[in-house]
Amino acid sequence: MTRSRSPRARPQRRSNGFHPLLGWALKLGLVGLVVLAGYGIYLDAVVQEKFSGKRWTVPAKVYARPLELFVGQKLTKNDFLTELDALGYRRETSVAGPGAALVAGNNVDLHTRGFQFYEGAEPARRVRVHFSGAYVAGLTQAGGASLAVARLEPLLVGGLYPAHHEDRILIKLEQAPPYLLQTLVAIEDREFFNHYGVSPKSIARAFWVNATAGQLRQGGSTLTQQLVKNFYLSNERSLSRKLNEAMMALLLELHYSKNEILEAYLNEVFLGQDGQRAVHGFGLASQFMFSQPMSELKLHQVALLVGIVKGPSYYNPRRYPERALERRNLILDVLAEQGVVTPEQAGAAKKQPLGVTQRGSLADSSYPGFLDLVKRQLRQDYREEDLTEEGLRIFTSFDPILQLKAEAALAETLKRLSAGRGKSVDEVEAAMLVTSPETGEVQALIGSRQPRFAGFNRVLDAVRPIGSLIKPAVYLTALERPSQYSLTSWLNDAPFSVKGQDGQVWKPQNYDRQAHGNVFLYQALANSYNLSTAKLGLELGVPTVLKTLERLGVSREFPAYPSMLLGAGSLTPMEVAGMYQTLANGGFNTPLRGIRSVLTAEGEPLKRYPFQIQQRFDPGAIYLVQNAMQRVMREGTGRSVYSQLPASLTLAGKTGTSNDSRDSWFAGFSQDLLAVVWLGRDDNGKTPLTGATGALQVWTGFMRKADPLPLDMPLPDNVIQAWIDPRTGQGSDPSCSGAQQMPYIRGSEPSPGSACGIQAPAGEVMDWVKGWLN
């Protein structure tokens, strides 16, 4: 009997409503949501941390000295207008608001902008300045009342940038000029106040425009998305970056108001490139394009800046003015269509030129040599990140007008020397420093024959033999001993030799290879005689002369070799200026400085740099040295200056030439200006220039342009003027033919002279003969 096989039992499928794959999908979805939520939390933290904290690193801004106006001030109308142009003052037919100026004859009416200085706020006000010749003859305010002093805002001369060279001027929303916010929203994001960071309507519109055009013509990004891209993300073109951008835009709008986002956009948007410096934000772009504060922009300027947002390189108005003009006018038409402005306003704005400033003008330049000095002095008190990130405001003594005149004098002189002496001058480099004799403040600095290019700063770093610039120190050492030396002491200018400890023989020579016999002490300095100077220095002792050099302000140590007496030691132009500063300031040492004060980014006083002063020498001895240095200019190696400068201008100075004319120096001063000039080759090669034929020519050209005050040092209490016979140095009756006055430390003057034609006593004759023979 065949048994039947029972059917195999089949497992029952549980009917719970879910397919296994669907379960896995749900699980993955939940994991994805968790991951997305976690990523969203991460992005939210990123958004809030940066936006609520310190949003930007702002470089320190360096300002020139403010121009102070007062009656009696030495200032020409042309120099004043140059400064106004640099500050971006507009020449208009009426003075309607801050930044406007009206020129009528010898009067300049202007509306100052006001500024926050270390000492407090200077208010904006209307001022009339009346000029007479080279002086301010009148200063009145609105209504005609006299004004004691008015101070213009200082020129921004540069910044101390971080490694990424990003720069901006931070602004508040309420500082935006008329039409800027409406124009920005109208052009970049019409739905800005209606969306939550992402605008589906804008995306759809952009998709339609691009699809119908067959190419990418329009983007759908909101202002918030643009801010996120610039503030948090890179310019990478990818789907992941766009998704991040959208999520972060939504998060940004969740936490912050529209006004906060709009203000951040105004400060963040990239609007141009100035060399290595990236120009961010409308505040800096206004200065960069128009040399004006943003608050003063007109409709046509606002339209241009907003137009540049779309493509700062493509619409660069300096490189592509036609493109920029077309873009600006298109924006003005859009504003008229949307009712932001009337058609008449748009039409009038379209008639305006672009109005951007020229690159390389005073208003759009940096001064790398001076900024280098400022950086070095600031680093003594501040960390690098303080200078590049905290937005400090550095106020300095820099005078842009004197800087321009120094640069012009250097360029003109080098061009003339090159024409006369050929290519040998083309490789000559240059350095120049201008200071105030009284305060030691640096007013102008040129570190290269191409002063606007950053590089090796020869004022601060070129250590070169100073030649005869050391000689005033030798003669000052002697004149501090009035019982032994006076300006009419006899010196013997004759050949000699000295054997050193190493067995080497030092045998100095005069530049003209001639000996000049017995000469007065002042004549030896005026004519820069080496033989008589070296003999005098050896009598005084080389260590003693080097000590005088130290007291003059030179901290560099030198070996006490005889050759040091003729300038074998090397100094930088900055160190030379410090030495001559003490000579120019009556024996009072004032360390050179370029910084006056520092404010925080918020305008709070941080540090002041008052000038220091210390009396190092007797005023009488300094007075005598100054007298001899004036004779350098009148009758000695510097006498060529009076072929270009008026004879009534009293000046003092000294030429310097190193061996084989490798270095050409001149250091000299008036009452209000001290300038040091060096010319030479970086490879220490020979030049065809002496101190008189090279550096002195630059110095003279500068002084001619600067029009300084004549040197007028009061007669110290211990100095008297005595009448002498200029041939013998003996006392003379003032009525005698040729009699001259000469200053002496009291008690060192010669005996009063006899009546003219009467022979002096035998004793005095013998003293004169001995002096001549010695």
Image (tube, rainbow, N blue to C red):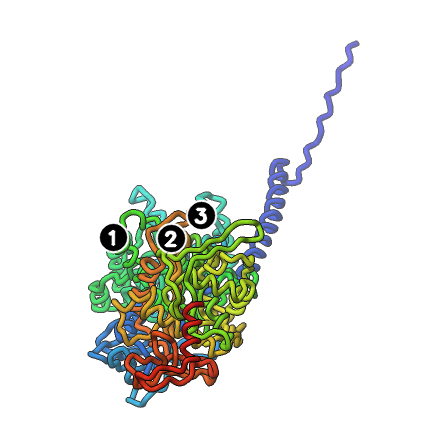
Q: Is residue 552 visible?
A: yes
Q: Mark 1: few, some, or many residues within 10 Å (few <14, many ≥20)?
A: few
Nearer the observer, 163 or 41: 163
Amino acid at circle 1 = Gly
Mark 3 — residue? 235
Q: Mark 2: few, some, or many residues within 10 Å (few <14, many ≥20)?
A: many
Amino acid at circle 3 = Asn
Q: Earlier in the sequence, mark 3 or mark 2?
A: 3
Q: Is residue 360 above or below residue 15?
A: below
Amino acid at circle 2 = Ser
Q: Distance between the Cα atoms at labels 3 and 1?
A: 56 Å
Q: Is residue 607 left or right of residue 655?
A: right
Q: Name the element at disc 1.
A: helix
Q: Distance between the Cα atoms at labels 3 and 2?
A: 57 Å
Q: In the rendered structure, find residue 118 and report the number of the disc placed on it.
A: none
Q: Residue furthest top?
A: 1
Mark 2 — residue? 661
Q: Nearer the viewer, mark 3 or mark 1?
A: 1
